[in-house]
């Protein structure tokens, strides 16, 4: 097999943080608020405008409240679990590393929690979840390229809180916000922004739970969308990334870009004798795409070669998964770069077998 002639124009295929969007530049960042007090009126107005952009872009209902929390999604979800849940029994849905982590956190908090678990590339059986239980799940799994795709397994009249980790789903999925009570995510995946802070979107039902419990972390008596002192530089980056996202066509067009990119990888996988998707087709995420090997191959040599030659960075499997190739094919990834990457992977498979 001949060595490919064309390298990807950008070797960044990491599943998070992901490639910055086309048009992004440090010189385009709005730096006027750097060095300012984050609770001053004009800075607060600036951040509130960004919140409105997020809500409009993602079709988040007006009656849902948005908080910024420290520590990316991990910190935000940990804060949410300890501050809001615990009043009711909890059903934890586990099909990836992060779902398992949230279950373990709930157990540490000594909450009453049961689970539905499957780690084989299929979703667990989601029948018979008690209508009064709080439910927690990952919508789109970065670690293994799987997704729930919808919440039809829950009643539309579900009385418990519905809690979802949306980090890899937000900005590439048309989400049913009115049925999600606590949605937690960070911004370094589909949007291509910097992680730094986490976002929690709370429904009126979730806000009522906080008020009734008088819990410590979300103080709604003195309600504020900023829980801590944030990086205003990260907000400048967030604003630019949202503007570029909407310039590219908004939610619908970014979903379509993902679908087209996913089709390239689908077509490649079908004819490939070396790899296959980890997940069954009906449970695959739109992005990332995770492939495992069908035959013995020198995995580390492939990863090292592609990295050293600046063909592809960070496409190694997630740390808890079996050896494989994990590719982010989100809206910031160009079609021709994906095609070039698959050509190089084919060459590597044959060279390093």
Image (cartoon, helix red, strand yellow):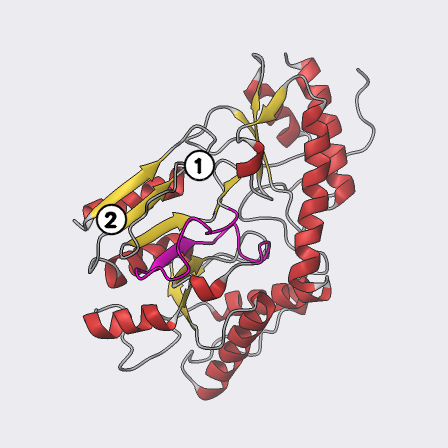
Mark 2 residue crowding within 10 angstroms, few (<14) / some (14–19) / many (20+):
many
| Residue 277 image label | none
The structure residue drawn at horizontal position 60% and vertical position 24%, both measured from the top left corner, is 276
| Residue 123 image label | 1
Task: List the residue tagged with mark 2.
Answer: 106
**Main SS class of the magenta portion in the image:** loop
Residue 292 in the image: above or below residue 285 = above
Q: Secondary structure at mark 2?
A: helix
Query: Residue 253, image x and y in percent?
Result: 71, 58
Query: Residue 52, image x and y in percent?
Result: 54, 76
Query: Residue 5, image x and y in percent?
Result: 83, 28
Query: Residue 57, image x and y in percent?
Result: 60, 68
Tell me which corner region of the image, top left, top right, bottom left or bottom right, holds residue 225. bottom left
Asked whether 271 falls inside the magenta stretch, the response is no
Q: Earlier in the sequence, mark 1 or mark 2?
A: 2
The structure residue drawn at horizontal position 62% and vertical position 66%, both measured from the top left corner, is 242
Contact flag, marks 1 and 2 (Cβ < 8 Å): no
Which quarter of the rendering shows the N terminus? top right
Residue 156 in the image: above or below residue 308 = below
In the image, taking residue 323 as reference, residue 259 lies left or right, namely right
In the image, taking residue 77 as reference, residue 55 lies left or right, namely right
Dot in front, 1 or 2: 1
How many numbered discs sit on the rendered protein?
2
Mark 1 residue crowding within 10 angstroms, few (<14) / some (14–19) / many (20+):
many
- Residue ranking furthest to the left: 110
Which quarter of the rendering shows the C terminus? top right
Q: CA distance from mark 1 to mark 2?
A: 21 Å
27 or 328: nearer the viewer = 328
Q: Secondary structure at mark 1?
A: loop
Q: Which residues are magenta?
A: 149-174
The structure residue drawn at horizontal position 47% and vertical position 24%, both measured from the top left corner, is 322
């Amino acid at each position: 097999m001949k060595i490919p002639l064309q390298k990807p124009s950008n070797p960044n295929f990491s599943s998070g943080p992901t490639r910055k969007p086309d048009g992004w530049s440090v010189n385009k960042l709005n730096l006027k608020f750097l060095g300012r007090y984050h609770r001053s009126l004009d800075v607060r107005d600036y951040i509130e405008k960004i919140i409105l952009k997020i809500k409009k872009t993602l079709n988040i209902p007006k009656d849902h409240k948005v908080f910024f929390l420290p520590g990316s999604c991990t910190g935000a979800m940990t804060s949410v679990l300890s501050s809001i849940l615990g009043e009711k029994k909890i059903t934890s849905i586990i099909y990836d590393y992060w779902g398992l982590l949230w279950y373990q956190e709930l157990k540490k908090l000594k909450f009453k929690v049961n689970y539905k678990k499957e780690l084989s590339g299929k979703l667990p059986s989601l029948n018979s979840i008690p209508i009064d239980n709080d439910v927690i799940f990952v919508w789109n799994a970065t670690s293994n390229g799987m997704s729930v795709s919808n919440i039809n397994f829950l009643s539309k009249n579900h009385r418990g809180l519905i809690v979802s980790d949306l980090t890899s789903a937000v900005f590439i999925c048309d989400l049913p916000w009115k049925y999600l009570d606590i949605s937690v995510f960070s911004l370094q995946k589909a949007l291509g922004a910097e992680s730094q802070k986490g976002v929690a979107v709370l429904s009126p039902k979730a806000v009522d739970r906080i008020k009734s419990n008088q819990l410590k972390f979300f103080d709604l008596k003195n309600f504020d969308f900023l829980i801590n002192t944030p990086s205003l530089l990260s907000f400048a980056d967030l604003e630019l990334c949202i503007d570029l996202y909407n310039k590219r066509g908004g939610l619908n067009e970014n979903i379509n870009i993902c679908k087209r990119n996913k089709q390239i990888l689908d077509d490649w996988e079908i004819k490939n004798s070396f790899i296959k998707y980890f997940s069954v087709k009906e449970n695959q995420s739109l992005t990332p795409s995770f492939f495992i090997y069908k035959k013995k191959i020198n995995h580390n040599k492939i990863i090292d070669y592609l990295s050293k030659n600046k063909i592809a960075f960070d496409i190694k499997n997630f740390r808890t998964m079996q050896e494989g190739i994990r590719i982010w094919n989100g809206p910031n990834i160009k079609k021709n770069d994906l095609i070039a990457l698959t050509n190089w992977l084919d060459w590597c498979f044959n060279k390093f077998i």
